[in-house]
Structures are given as structure tokens and as C-alpha cells.
Image (spheres, helix red, strand yellow):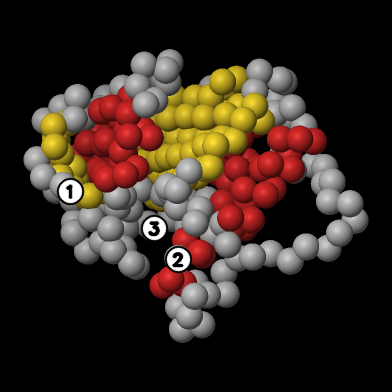
Amino acid sequence: MINWINNSSFEIDGYRLTLDWAAGGSKRASSDRDFTMMKGRDFIDHYTKMVNTGIEKVLEVGVYQGGSVVFLDKLLRPKKFCAIELSEQAIPALDKYARNSGDRVNIYYGTSQDNAQAIEKIIRQDFDGQVDFVVDDASHWYEYSKATFMAVFPHVKPGGYYFIEDWSWSFQPDFQKPSNGWFNQNSLANLAIDLMEDMVNSDAIDSIEVVRQMIKVRRSSAPSRPVFETTARRSRQTNLL
């Protein structure tokens, strides 16, 4: 399904996707059939492995220039695809793509990933309360990403997946200097610890896979329940990374 043009661009079903990562955001704008996706090539295989796994409802958190929406929609071909984006600035090429989908793809601008009420409303009205596959590629900040997980994961179907991208940013050289704008932000790696703790203390999480590019959380077949309700840290006070 993917035809690589060069090391950073490929075609899928008549659309060109260009991988263009830059600190602070790529300045390459998407156009009608040429979308920008802010990911490295090493991310792609993690998603191609999800083909033919029964994914029918996809929620993406954070769209930037919309390339990942087009990529995942063309790759997985779900019956319904919704994406939320903090920015209120519309992406014309993405809006056109959504309009041409026949109401199958919906984009919700001006929606923060920590707005649990808004996100749960979207899940109820667009997915009938249950989603198969979630991709969090939004703020990459610990508190915001945890808030999203708490709101959304109870709605993931048994056997469904929740991917959290770029968990390792705080360990990278660029983020070690106090002059970096994210220096005082808590590491997203903290969420990996929270997830492991919850997997042990509840039966909602079936498995967690941590790879360089992302954290992959798989939903168990147990009845839906809130996450992070119980802590088990032997009364120890731990500092956030």
C-alpha cells in the first residue's frame, strides 16, 4: 500500500505524505494531495503492523498538518475516524479531505487533550461510546497525556490499542539545557511508570510495550473501569522526572 518516493516521502492511495520533523513544528504546509506528517520514517512500521487487525474506529489526538490523519485513514480504512486538535486554526487541505469522506472523518479543532468532557462527548456521539485504536501525538506533556488516557482508555474496546508517541523526549540532548522551553515540563516517561503500576493493580490493561518511538498499551477483555484509581508504591514519595 505504501510506495516510497525517497527517504522522507511516500504515496498511499493517490496521496503523497512527506515526513518533516522540526523542533517547534514543521513549517511545511499540507496541500490537497501532498500532506505533511511530523514523524520519522522509523514510526511507519509500527502502524503498518496494525493493518487487518479489525480496526474500525480511530481517534487521533493532535493532528498538526493533518498528514497522520490521511496516512492512518488510508492505511487502516476504518469506518469512522475522528481527530482532535488544540489549535483553532483550520487546515484547509485536511478539511477538504474530511468533507470528501462523506462524514466518515471528523476533525475537532480548538479541543484540548485534557478536556475530558469534550473528548468523552465525541466518543459517545461519533463512536457510540467505544473506540478501537487511539493515537496520542499531541502535547507530549505528562499531565496532559495522562488526562487524555484517563478519559479515553475506559472506552477502548477489548483487545484495542492506545499508542502514546514520543515518550522519550526528556532524555534527548536538546532538552537537557535550562534554556529549553520544555526544561521544566515533567517527562512523559512518568506515564510509563503509572501505566505499569495500573496494569498490576487493575485488570484493564492487558499489556504494555515500550519502544523507542512510542508506548503501546493494549486493552484487556475485563469490564471497563477507571484507570489510576489505586496506587501501590509502598508509601514511598517519588519525584517526577
Spatial CA distance of label 1 from label 3 is: 26 Å
Q: Is residue 181 above or below residue 160?
A: below
- For the point 32% across and 34% down, the residue is 45
* N-terminal label among 2 and 1: 1
Mark 1 touches mark 3? (CB < 8 Å): no
- For the point 56% across and 20% down, the residue is 159
* N-terminal label among 3 and 2: 3
The answer, for residue 117, to whether it is visible in the render is: no
Q: For mark 3, what is the residue? A: 87
Q: Is residue 49 above or below residue 187?
A: above
Left-right relation of 75 to 50: left
- For the point 45% across and 48% down, the residue is 212
Amino acid at dot 2: Gln
Q: For mark 1, what is the residue? A: 8
Spatial CA distance of label 3 from label 2 is: 26 Å
Q: How far from the left and from the top, in percent, is residue 125?
A: 51, 28
Left-right relation of 223 to 51: right
Q: Quadrant of the C terminus?
A: bottom right
Q: How far from the left and from the top, in percent, is residue 115?
A: 58, 50
- Indicate the secondary structure of the residue bearing disc 2: loop
* N-terminal label among 1 and 3: 1
In this view, the residue in front, 114 or 167, is 167
Q: Callout 1: few (<14), some (14-19), or many (20+) C-alpha neighbours within 10 Å?
A: some
Q: For mark 2, what is the residue? A: 172
Left-right relation of 164 to 95: right
Q: Quadrant of the N terminus?
A: top left
